[in-house]
């Protein structure tokens, strides 16, 4: 029976937040006939479901061992949400003497799946190893053959397959036939038909299950997608006189975004913007009468989180905007910014939803030394039930208007129980709805947000620039944390113009796009990235000059195209390659290979037979040469094998081996993105 977990009550209340059901008790370890430990993927030791997506190749790993020297067999059994068995797969050892096992499963529908590890004694493998050692040495020959024949007879009795019975009994007869030479009798037991049968239909004793281990399978977009962020108010806007763009003018930009191959269009808050303490251009405190303010200062006399900014249009206009995106194969991700301007209706209707200071004023948001006088944070401690109900109402309202993806602003500034409850509630009724956590904060909080249900997470990618930094961080994202956290590698955001992009020129933008798009199944860019926008408001700042957060920023896309001042053609190719190659849609298969040059990264990704190799420079200013030493075993090849390397970037093809010399130039080609095929 599931236990219940109680959220700490708010100050001055009586058990204000009701108990939330907790997950089942996780599987035990070291308490069966055979030992199974170190199971992955798992989240919080099985107390939370691990993450997976429809069609994803999910590597299942475990450590399993037994006493003595007898053989062990290990299976992974995948269970559908209704409890039926989807597959049972024999796990294979990883290395020699490590007792580590691995197999892959592929769930094919959304829901709460699970898997069970089964460890069992393998009498046949035990006998076969013993016989191949003792019989050639002339030790207990007839006894070994007799015992082997008995095992084959047991296997034959356990099946009604006529062909299998004939194979097994024929081998048993040969084993016990004294008229045959000893090598011939032993060869009967090692015949491929026999060994294949015994592997597929093993004799198992002492079966020890570990599990079920929970696996929450989301729709494919939770794992794979190319995101594009833009401000609808800037598309079609005018600066003299100042006038906002609308959903109708913003819809005209959607076709170009779709043609570049993006899947998701993320728009900042679309709600009315407050007037009190409104910020002016470049975050100044002196706005003009026509300055629009920041969209994250939600709420005015025109309404709050359930309203549309009048300058953008009406709710019907928004519905048309979403419909047009869907026609083009795009999804709209809506910003869920749970905060309020001083003019939000909540401030007068529910002052208990905010923090009141000693002087009676409501506390505005601060991240010292930054101050956000135009934004009031929410406080869930005074009326947790009332405020939570309003949050879920808002989310479901926009779901009703076609939104199936929410980018959540600063989720780390809200109690975890809010997200635990909200995301569980939404998944229970609408499992296709996804939430992206915009939380650039301490790693434990980022992990916890993923573990309570966020399907995607922002990352520190924008601040990882050297080859060593990128490699180490990518291995973390594709390694253990992939069990619960799915990264979205944004190359830039309205808040983050990295120092690297400020000084790297067009080559730096191509490098960052290449890395983001090939290291992670999901990545994103903020509008203007393709135009190489790189000027900061001041030295040492990551804020854009004339930041779009505080003013309209219309762009002349056509002039940039005609003049060739755009990265759009390369982004289009990147997105096309990502769609064409399942390997680039995978997270956990990422493997780095040794490069002699510390400024050049080499890595591979694989899904089934599809293998993609990437060699990318991290230096936007100088030509780089290196020799890459491929881990051929990791690519499924012998050390002396050769393969055909089809470069997607240049269209060239070469024959490569274990060592490959390359030259990369920031003015010609910053990366080789290679599809590998056998000769």
Image: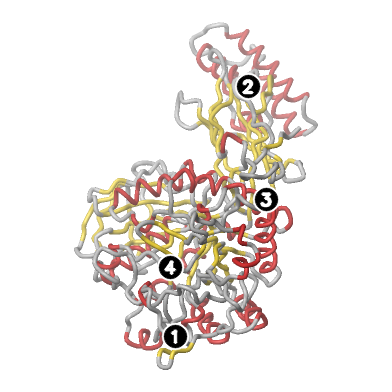
Q: Nearer the viewer, mark 1 or mark 2?
A: 1
Q: Which residue is mark 4?
A: 525
Observer-side mark, 2 or 3, equals 3
Mark closer to the chain start, 1 or 4 = 1
Q: In the picture, residue 278 is in which quadrant?
A: bottom left
Please state the horizontal and vertical placement of residue 29, each as a whole percent of the image.
Answer: 60, 24
Ranked by sequence position, the earlier of labels 3 and 4 is 3
The residue labelled by disc 2 is 122
In the displayed orientation, state which residue is furthest to the bottom. 241
Separation of marks 1 and 2 at Cα, in angstroms: 80 Å
> Mark 1 sits on what residue?
289
Q: Is any part of residue 609 visible from this angle?
A: no
In the figure, is residue 355 to the left or right of 82?
A: left
Q: Earlier in the sequence, mark 1 or mark 3?
A: 1
The answer to the question of whether label 1 and label 4 lie on touching residues, with beta carbons closer than 8 A, is no
Query: Which residue is labeled 3 in the image?
Result: 424
The tag earlier along the polypeptide, 1 or 2, is: 2
Q: Residues within 10 Å of mark 3 (few under 14, many from 20)?
A: some
């Amino acid at each position: 029976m599931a236990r219940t977990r109680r959220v700490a009550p708010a100050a001055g209340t009586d058990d204000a937040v009701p108990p939330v059901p907790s997950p089942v008790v996780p599987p035990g370890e070291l308490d069966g006939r055979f030992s199974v430990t170190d199971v992955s993927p798992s989240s919080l030791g099985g107390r939370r479901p691990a993450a997976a997506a429809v069609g994803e190749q999910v590597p299942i790993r475990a450590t399993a061992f037994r006493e003595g020297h007898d053989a062990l067999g290990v299976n992974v059994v995948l269970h559908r949400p209704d409890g039926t068995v989807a597959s049972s797969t024999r796990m294979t050892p990883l290395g020699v003497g490590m007792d580590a096992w691995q197999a892959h499963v592929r769930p094919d529908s959304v829901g709460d799946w699970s898997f069970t590890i089964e460890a069992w004694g393998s009498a046949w493998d035990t006998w076969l190893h013993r016989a191949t050692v003792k019989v050639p040495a002339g030790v207990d020959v007839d006894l070994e053959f007799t015992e082997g024949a008995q095992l084959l007879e047991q296997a034959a009795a356990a099946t009604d397959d006529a062909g299998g019975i004939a194979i097994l009994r024929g081998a048993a007869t040969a084993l016990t036939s004294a008229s045959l030479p000893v090598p011939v009798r032993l060869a009967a037991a090692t015949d491929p038909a026999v060994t294949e049968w015994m592997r597929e239909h093993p004799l198992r004793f002492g079966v020890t299950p570990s599990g079920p281990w929970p696996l929450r399978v989301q729709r494919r977009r939770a794992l794979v997608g190319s995101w594009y962020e833009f401000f609808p108010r800037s598309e079609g806007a005018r600066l003299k006189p100042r006038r906002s763009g609308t959903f109708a003018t913003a819809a005209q930009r959607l076709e170009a975004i779709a043609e570049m191959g993006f899947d998701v269009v993320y728009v900042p808050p679309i709600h009315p913007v407050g007037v009190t303490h409104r910020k002016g251009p470049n975050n100044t405190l002196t706005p003009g009468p026509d300055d629009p303010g920041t969209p994250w200062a939600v709420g005015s006399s025109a309404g709050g989180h359930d309203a549309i900014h009048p300058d953008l249009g009406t709710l019907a206009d928004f519905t048309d905007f979403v419909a047009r995106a869907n026609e083009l194969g795009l999804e709209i991700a809506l910003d869920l910014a749970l905060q309020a301007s001083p003019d939000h209706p909540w401030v007068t209707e529910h002052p208990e939803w905010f923090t009141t200071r000693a002087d009676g004023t409501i506390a505005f948001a601060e991240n010292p030394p930054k101050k956000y006088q135009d934004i009031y944070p929410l406080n869930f401690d005074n009326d947790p039930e009332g405020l939570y109900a309003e949050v879920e109402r808002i989310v479901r309202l926009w779901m009703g208007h076609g939104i199936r993806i929410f980018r959540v602003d600063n989720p780390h500034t809200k109690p975890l129980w809010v997200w635990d409850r909200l995301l569980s509630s939404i998944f229970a009724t609408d499992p296709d709805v996804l939430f992206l956590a915009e939380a650039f904060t301490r790693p434990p909080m980022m992990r916890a947000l993923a573990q309570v249900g966020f399907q995607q997470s922002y990352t520190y990618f924008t601040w990882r620039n050297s080859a060593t930094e990128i490699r180490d961080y990518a291995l973390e994202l594709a390694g253990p944390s992939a069990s619960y956290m799915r990264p979205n590698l944004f190359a830039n955001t309205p808040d983050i113009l990295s120092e690297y992009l400020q000084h790297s020129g067009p080559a730096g933008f191509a490098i960052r796009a290449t890395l983001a798009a090939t290291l992670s199944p999901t990545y994103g860019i903020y509008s203007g990235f393709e135009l190489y926008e790189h000027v900061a408001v001041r030295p040492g700042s990551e804020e854009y000059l004339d930041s779009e957060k505080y003013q309209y920023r219309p762009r002349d896309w056509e002039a940039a195209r005609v003049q060739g001042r755009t990265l759009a053609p390369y982004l289009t190719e990147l997105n096309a390659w990502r769609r064409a190659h399942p390997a680039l849609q995978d997270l956990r298969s990422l493997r780095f290979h040794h490069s002699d040059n510390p400024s050049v990264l080499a890595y591979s990704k694989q899904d089934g037979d599809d293998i993609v190799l990437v060699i990318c420079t991290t230096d936007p200013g100088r030509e780089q040469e290196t020799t890459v030493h491929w881990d051929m075993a990791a690519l499924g090849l012998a050390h002396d094998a050769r393969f055909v390397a089809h470069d997607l970037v240049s269209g060239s093809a070469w024959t490569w081996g274990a060592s490959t010399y390359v030259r990369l130039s920031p003015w010609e080609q910053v990366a080789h993105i290679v599809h590998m095929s056998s000769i």
